[in-house]
Amino acid sequence: MVDQAARLRQLVDKSEYEAQRAEPVSPPSLSAMGPRVIAITSGKGGVGKTNIAVNLAIALGQAGQRVLVIDADLGMANVDVILGSMSKKHLLNLLEQGTELKDVLMNGPYGVRYISGGSGIEKAADFTYEERQRLIQKLTACGQMADIILIDTGAGLGKNVMDFILAADEVLLVTTPEPTALTDAYAVLKAYSMYAAQKNIKLIVNRVYDETESREVVVKLQQTSQRFLQMNIDCLGYVFEDSAVMKSVRQQQPFLAAHPNSIASRCIQGLVNSILYGSKMTVKRGWKGFLRQIFNFAH
């Protein structure tokens, strides 16, 4: 699995020579490192992973970053759905002779550039060696197009999901406070702790009602991870429960675009500040926000 992850890592920027070097080297300058490759994943579906990925892409673009989203949830074109867009070609069309990167790269709405994972693809992960080489060759140019590449993986512990997680520089694990989501998030942490050569994973707690609830979730996962996996994990931040999110999903619009002043949108901006500058999130719902949230949910 680790060998396969190393090859997949090459899909975005690394050369054969870099991937096969065994001796340690000094970190290159930031300009020479290429894009940050961030996998966004979750233990179970329905926790808002893709929604967060798309809105992060918009906010990062607004912050001056060149962003590319790769929908690696093969078979589920959820990035298309959230953007209200439609792709004629998807990631696996690159396996076809005559299909090039420009044919699958979408300049989507709200400034989001992305490659769709397609819909209804079967046997998506069973690539031959020749097919992998073809994908590597065609996707290499992505490294010159972006400062940050967001990989929206599938949910769970499937082989394809783990490959992308292990191949990324950084991993953002999205969960909610629900017990099933926490259990599945821990399963991802366990697998990651076993196979990741260099561990760099952070939590995003979605759909929380206040900062205290987010902190409780984080502490629970941190303590469990430290005790049983001997792995420390940090929290990137949280996203408050917000009726604007569901409204935007129904409208097939990212909530950052449809409701830029919503509490969820402010949380996304906080996450972006954490990603770019390492700053701690300080988004507060406040009393007015609390009242607005309570009465909005009555409708």
Image (cartoon, rainbow, N blue to C red):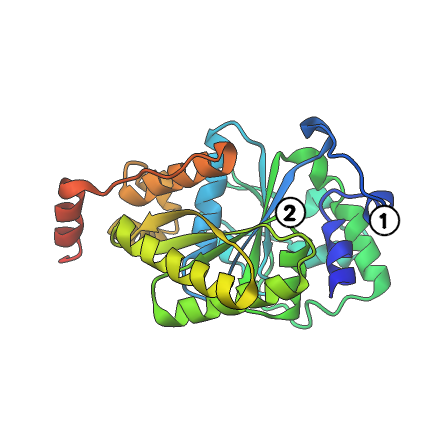
Label 1 sits on residue: 22
Which three-letter amino acid code belongs to the residue tagged 2? Asp
Front residue of 264/203: it is 203
Q: Residue at x 41, y 57 (%)?
A: 48
Label 2 secondary element: loop
Quadrant position of the C terminus in the picture: bottom left
Q: Which residue is mark 2?
A: 169
Amino acid on which the number 1 mark rests in the picture: Ala
Q: Position of residue 115 (x, y in %)?
A: 61, 49
> Residue 110, can we see it?
no
Crowding near the residue tagged with mark 2, few <14, some 14–19, many ≥20 C-alpha atoms within 10 Å: some
Of the pair 147 and 181, the residue shown nearer to us: 181
Q: Are marks 2 and 1 in contact (CB under 8 Å)?
A: no
> Residue 128: which quarter of the image?
bottom right
**Coordinates of residue 297 in the picture (x, y in percent):** 17, 56
Q: Position of residue 80 (x, y in %)?
A: 50, 53
Judged from the image, the secondary structure of the residue bearing numbered disc 1 is: loop
